[in-house]
Amino acid sequence: MSRFWSSLVHELKPYVPGEQPKIADLVKLNTNENPYGPSPKALAAIAAAAGDDLRLYPEPTGLALRAAVAAHHGLGVDQVFVGNGSDEVLAHTFQALLKHERPLLFPDISYSFYPTYCRLYGIAPVEVPLRDDFRIAIGDYDRPAGAVIIPNPNAPTGIALPLAEIETLLAQDPDRVVVIDEAYVDFGAESAIALVPRYENLLVIQTFSKSRSLAGLRVGFAIGQRPLIEALERVKDSFNSYPLDRLALVGATAAFEDQAWFETTTARIVASRTALVDALAGLGFSVLPSAANFVFARHASAKGEALAAALRSRGVLVRRFGAPRIADFLRITVGTDAQCERLIGALREIL
Ligand code: PMP
């Protein structure tokens, strides 16, 4: 016999992350991880911290990391909030800042965690359709709302908005919170962090998972003026007063300070992206203009589902999404040149 509580969470349809199978020799281009590994200085800092001190609680506010990020951007340490991956920072943001009686706007094709958080926190989303060319048109957001969240570059399209457009969005309604999710910004888009001193309604969220190659460490951060950051701190303190563990704190701080590693590896990924786009175009794909570490591509005749399955059977994993408008697209992470060549070789066999 079923109990009343057996159905309590059944309404909730959780976000499903990309698969992480353990198959030898697999080319894993499905979850936008960085192929180059974290900064060696970050790994050394983590190894050094993995000792007896782990019996102690971590510093509760992530102060060392916040100070490094704040100094880099010429901001105050109290304008930076850190969390356990940008997914957690986003969760706190939804709860602290996006939960209004007025609706929350976001693009109808964007990060699929947004609708999940709306369901979790009881927020009414208004999904704003992308234009026919898969671009965000900022004029479409000029309507009454409590808040807006937009990834820049957008995911999974990879298309970036120029900073001037973000500024237009911010100025449309100073009473509306605007969150820019910059998970992929370091691969070719302009960061809105520069606008934070001028717009009190702006929150920018970034992650260490992509350009810093630390997806496994789970570190993300938000930057904004004090009232928005304070709202996040209140939610965090009511949820988990130790968001970052000791290893994450030292590892992320060292990674952030290793600017040389960051620049070399992101430049390599950007160069490989250009080569990948050319090779895909040569095989009959149309590829959306990407400012991210992935490309979003559709073949002129082959169906997305069949292509993804044929690639998989050749040991190459890519990501597909179910929404009808993008069902024939493949989202392909930019790997090393060797990985991209494996993908292109497999596609030549298939097509
Ligand atoms: N935002 C966007 C747009 C993403 O694609 C991702 C990665 N899946 C995230 C946020 C979350 O990244 P993380 O939790 O690893 O920081």
Image: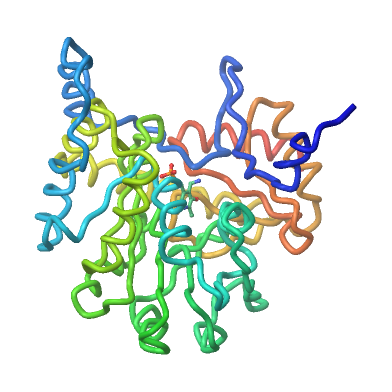
Hey, which quadrant is residue 189 in on the image? bottom left
Residue 21 versus residue 112 in the image, above or below: above
Q: Determine the residue positioned at 31% across, 46% down.
A: 237
Which corner quadrant holds the N terminus?
top right
Residue 85 versus residue 45 in the image, above or below: below
**Color scheme of the displayed model:** rainbow
Question: Is residue 314 something that shows in the picture?
Answer: yes
Most foreground residue, 222 or 133: 222
Q: Quick check: 208 left or right of 290?
A: left
Number of marks in the rendered image = 0
Q: Quick check: 322 left or right of 18?
A: right
Hey, which quadrant is residue 205 in on the image? bottom left
Q: Position of residue 307 (x, y in %)?
A: 75, 42
Q: Determine the residue positioned at 57% across, 54% down.
A: 117
* Residue lying at the far right of the rendered structure: 1
Q: Quick check: 108 left or right of 32?
A: right
Q: Determine the residue positioned at 15% across, 17% down.
A: 48
Q: Determine the residue positioned at 51% across, 48% down.
A: 276
Most foreground residue, 244 or 309: 244
* Residue lying at the far top of the rendered structure: 52
Hey, which quadrant is residue 188 in on the image? bottom left
Which corner quadrant holds the C terminus?
top right
Q: Position of residue 116 (x, y in %)?
A: 61, 52
Q: Position of residue 123 (x, y in %)?
A: 59, 64
Most foreground residue, 280 or 333: 333
Question: Is residue 156 something that shows in the picture?
Answer: no
Q: Quick check: 152 left or right of 63?
A: right
